Image: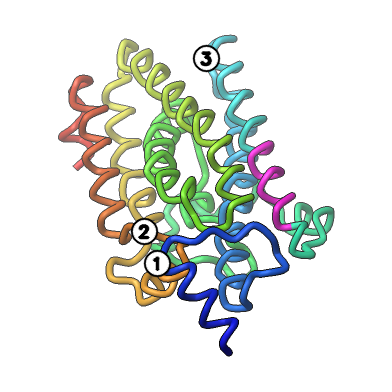
Amino acid sequence: MSDTMNIDDYLASGGVLTSPDNVPARYRGELMRLMSSFVDSELAASAGFAASINFAPGIRERIAASRITLEKADHAERVLNVMGAFGTDIARYQSQHDWAARLARDADLGTARREGDMRLSVFHYPINSWTDAVVMNVLMGLATDVQMTELTRISYGPLAEVFREIAPREAAHAELGLEGLKAILETENGRRDAEEALAYWMPRVAATFGVSGSGRHETLARFGLRHSTNATLLARWQALLADWLAPLGLARAAT
């Protein structure tokens, strides 16, 4: 009990753990949950963008979609390797789901996860066009950028280091999306299609920030696995999104 309390105090004061050997059981459970959510989401995102490659209108766009597909799979592998240090069967884990599987377009999961699958709910919805893929990538890319401000400073050192390596490439994915969105807006019906995609994806990406006032936040904050509340992160995303979309005349469509 004394050792456990000492570790809890250490984490609460900003301490960093560096090995599975000195991780308390409750902390381990929350850390594994966090990693599973990231890995499952990246694998599902990779599969979704792989299916979008053939929607691309040109070679440059195909390269961008292929890059995102590749790098998201690579990011999943890096975090899965950290999970392996905790005893996860890596080979079995990565093949446990059909990562390309999607629900009906009009399904409404809200913030819920499907049993046994830790991907964020947004990655259960299908992408049905190039504009759809680009808009979803911009919205989710900015959401990931906001979440990375949390993940890069979590209290498990080896994982935080992986996230610091990943963060710039995730940010670049959003930049690729913005470039693609600008090109779409110059096409016939591009603005209309982009506004329709924004209306579809906005609430689904917003749901990835979870429930405001989550009861788990206090525990995660005490463990150094979270610093900001869900509501704070959501507000940051909304502000960042407005900064990106206002110059394109799309800010109103995103509200």
Q: Which residues are magenta?
A: 73-83
Q: On the image, numbered disc 2 is attached to which residue?
A: 227
Instruction: Give the residue type that dot 3 points to.
Output: Pro
Between the C-alphas of marks 1 and 2, the distance is 6 Å
Task: Give the camera-side residue of 11 and 115.
Answer: 11
Of the 4 image quadrants, the one containing the N terminus is bottom right
- Residue at x 53% of width, y 53% of height: 124
Instruction: Give the residue type that dot 1 points to.
Output: Ala
Q: On the image, numbered disc 3 is attached to which residue?
A: 57
Q: Earlier in the sequence, mark 3 or mark 2?
A: 3
Task: Give the camera-side residue of 19 and 239.
Answer: 19
- Residue at x 48% of width, y 67% of height: 11
- Coloring scheme of the render? rainbow
Between the C-alphas of marks 3 and 1, the distance is 45 Å
Q: Is residue 187 above or below residue 229?
A: above
The count of marks equals 3
Q: On the image, numbered disc 1 is attached to which residue?
A: 221
- Examine the image and state in which quarter residue 103 appears: bottom right
Proximity of marks 3 and 2: CB atoms separated by less than 8 Å: no
Q: Earlier in the sequence, mark 1 or mark 2?
A: 1
Q: Is residue 34 above or below residue 241?
A: below
